Image (spheres, rainbow, N blue to C red):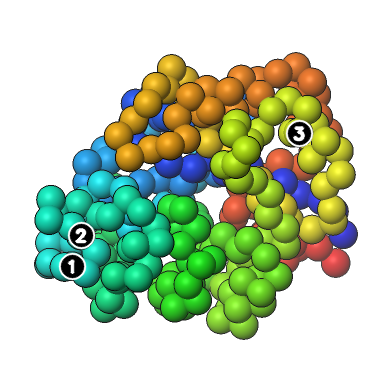
Amino acid sequence: MTARLIVTADDYGLAREVDDGIVDLVAAGCVTAVSVLVNRPCAPDLSRLGGVAPGLHLDLTLGQPASSVPVPSLVGGDGAFRGDAGAQLEALDLADVAREWRAQLAAFQALAGRAPAHLDVHKHLHARDGRLLELVLELARPHRIPVRSLDAGMRTRCRAAGVPAADHFLGGVEPGPYWTPARLCAALARLPDGITELMCHPGRGVVALPGLAYASERNAERDAFLHEDVGAALARCELAGFAAAFAQRKASP
């Protein structure tokens, strides 16, 4: 097998400073996939992403619902999602989640004019609650949209549902900044065979944002990807977006 690398930047639409850092790495050829937030008040400008096909970053913990129908188990008294992931997982009603995520998918399709190139979940709640993974798979199954899988168990469940999943996953937010030039170079030097998704959180000029712990670290991640040693390491990788990576797998003997 060949080692193929998808580099996904998360949280597009969160703030102008976050979007600017992601666009910088798209322009530099470092990022091949972008995960987009579409629930209120996020207002992503997809025209800035060039040829990178956007995916949907399903959300339950940041901002306000996209659903026009009430989803009472998901919001606090201010009408916004609970920012604490643990509290949200304890309080949520699956019917509300399904309603909200269908609304986010519809909002994405109206914005992009197409289905998402991939699906993942803010704060990886689908890795913490198997019921949420099943809801993501329900959204992904009709168009066989790839779903982010953090481990072998998630990959098995995706593939059993007929949904593509990368073979390996890299990335995190702790310790921050997660991606430094040294850590990136080390990871890129030992990519395993198959498809690896590497998640990152770049930004440019990001300062403290309400409800967001990972802020200035985004600036450091952007700078890490633009470091000359990382550029040289990326040049030795077979970079691809989700569609190309899985199409190449189908075409392989």
Mark 2: give few (<14), some (14-19) or many (20+) Cα within 10 Å.
Answer: many
Please say if 106 is above or below 157.
Answer: above
Q: Does residue 163 appear in this view? A: yes
Please name the residue that numbered disc 2 is placed on.
75
> What mark, if any, has residue 183 been given in the picture?
3
Residue at 52% from the left image edge and 22% from the top image edge: 219
Q: Name the foreground residue: 24 vs 39.
A: 39
Q: Tell me the quarter of the picture where residue 142 sits.
A: bottom left
- Local SS, label 3: helix
Q: Does residue 66 appear in this view? A: no
Q: Name the foreground residue: 182 vs 114.
A: 182
In this rendering, the label closer to the viewer, 1 or 2: 2
Indicate the amino acid at tag 1. Answer: Val
> What mark, if any, has residue 71 been given in the picture?
1
User: Image check: 45 left or right of 64?
Assistant: right
Quadrant where the N terminus is found in the figure: bottom right
